[in-house]
Amino acid sequence: MRMPAMHYGTAPGIFYCRAGSRVIFLDVNRDRYFQLGADLEASFLSVIEGHSAPTLAVSTLTERGILCSKDGNEVRQQVELPVPSRAADALKGETTLGETLRTLLTETRIRKRLDRQGLASVISSLRSEKARAVTASIDHRLPARTIRAFELAKLARTPANRCLSRSIALVQRLAALGCAAHLVMGVRGIPFAAHSWAQIGDVVLNDSPEEVARFTPIFVL
């Protein structure tokens, strides 16, 4: 028996993308990436694309918190960004010792919050802070100094496994200065890897276009 798919969509906190030949999922509420078996993945794609799928598969996807009924729910729209084509000029600009120290403290605070409160809580707070930002320009002195400070802060701490906390911290600091940047979380399939960066338009603020091009965005805020 097959179940119509028109009343189903991804559950709150579930994001996905095609990375190579497979679909990778991000569960923001559980701080994890995951994949489905081939048959269940095919059923998920069938439902999402508006086609029918086996009733048992739809029930399984619903019970596992991947699909939910869309009746009465707002349809979530993922933010779409241009493909990054250049790095921010501010990466090679000037900053101050005070701003660099502030950068290190902000990143440390974000990392501890991720450990204690989880990704969903940090993302919720960041969304509220971004709502108060009024411009997407980084040409002003303070945003440019902040971007440079985050680049210098990499010299004090190894970048390994810190891209998420560093990118969240950068987006947060820029939002406090009135500048609305995007947090981007990306993945690749084989071998699996995840990466995060900050971006405005087609400009990468804390990485190179060549590096982030290796990843497919799965979540954008």
Image (tube, rainbow, N blue to C red):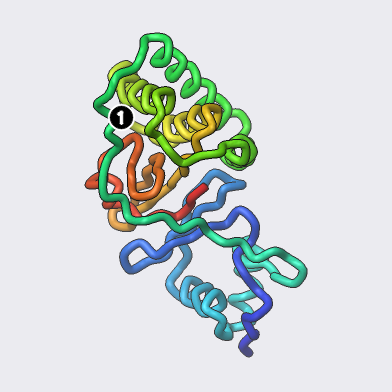
Image quarter of the N terminus: bottom right
Q: Nearer the viewer, residue 5 or 183?
A: 183
The crowding category of the residue bearing disc 1, from other C-alpha atoms within 10 Å (few below 14, some 14 to 19, many at least 20), is many
**Residue occupying image coordinates x 69% and y 64%:** 74
Q: Residue furthest front?
A: 140
Q: Residue at x 37, y 27 (%)?
A: 144
Q: Which residue is mark 1?
A: 90
Q: Residue at x 35, y 61 (%)?
A: 19
Of all residues, the one furthest to the bottom in this rendering is 1
Please tell me whether mark 1 sits on a helix, a strand or a loop. helix
- Percent of width and height locating residue 63: 67, 65
Outermost residue, right side: 72
Query: Hey, which quadrant is residue 127 in on the image?
Result: top right
- Of 170 and 165, the residue lying toward us: 170
How many marks the image carries: the answer is 1
Image coordinates for residue 106, horizontal then vertical, percent: 50, 21
Q: Taking the image as drawn, is residue 171 in sight?
A: yes
Is residue 121 at all visible to an observer of this figure?
no
The residue shown at (53%, 73%) is: 44
Along the horizontal axis of the image, is 75 left or right of 211?
A: right
Question: In this rendering, is residue 165 above or below 39?
Answer: above
Looking at the image, which is closer to me, 124 or 36?
124
201 or 119: which is nearer to us?
201
Name the spot of residue 117 as percent of width and height, x first: 63, 32
Amino acid type at circle 1 is: Ala
